[in-house]
């Protein structure tokens, strides 16, 4: 059986359900030195692949 329910929430909370706090998440990721190192290595490999493809 299914029943419909309605909840009343603050508008700011509602907006937060659909808009991620990207700045907060990105700043937290930047503090993770291991992740940053891996991301830099990955991006450098991609750049190298593009250089090879252009030749």
Image (cartoon, rainbow, N blue to C red):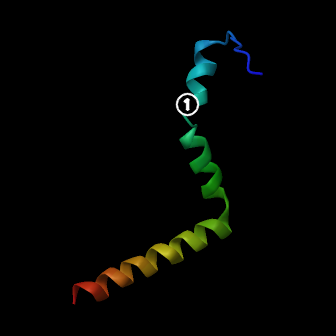
Residue ranking furthest to the left? 55
Report crowding for label 1: few under 14, some 14 to 19, many 20 or more residues within 10 A (C-alpha): few
- In the rendered image, the quadrant that contains the C terminus is bottom left
The percent position of residue 28, horizontal first and vertical second, equals 65, 50
Residue sitting at 71 percent across and 13 percent down? 5
The percent position of residue 41, horizontal first and vertical second, equals 52, 77
Q: Considering depth in this image, is 36 or 14 the residue closer to the camera? A: 14
Q: Which residue is mark 1?
A: 18
Residue sitting at 68 percent across and 9 percent down? 8
Rendered image quadrant of residue 31: bottom right
Residue ranking furthest to the front? 1
Q: Is residue 4 positioned above or below 53 on the image?
A: above
- Count the marks: how many? 1
The percent position of residue 15, horizontal first and vertical second, equals 55, 23
Q: Considering depth in this image, is 2 or 52 the residue closer to the camera? A: 2
Residue sitting at 69 percent across and 14 percent down? 4
Residue sitting at 59 percent across and 72 percent down? 37
The percent position of residue 45, horizontal first and vertical second, equals 45, 81
Name the secondary structure under disc 1: helix
Instruction: Give left or right: position of 13 versus 52.
Output: right
- In the rendered image, the quadrant that contains the N terminus is top right
Q: Is residue 50 positioned above or below 26 on the image?
A: below
Rendered image quadrant of residue 18: top right
Q: Is residue 38 positioned above or below 22 on the image?
A: below
Residue ranking furthest to the right? 1
Instruction: Give left or right: position of 51 versus 3.
Output: left
């Amino acid at each position: 059986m299914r029943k419909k329910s309605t909840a009343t929430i603050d508008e700011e909370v509602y907006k937060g359900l659909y808009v991620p706090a990207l700045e907060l998440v990105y700043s937290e990721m930047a503090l993770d030195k291991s992740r940053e190192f891996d991301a830099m290595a990955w991006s450098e490999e991609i750049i190298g692949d593009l250089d090879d493809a252009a030749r």
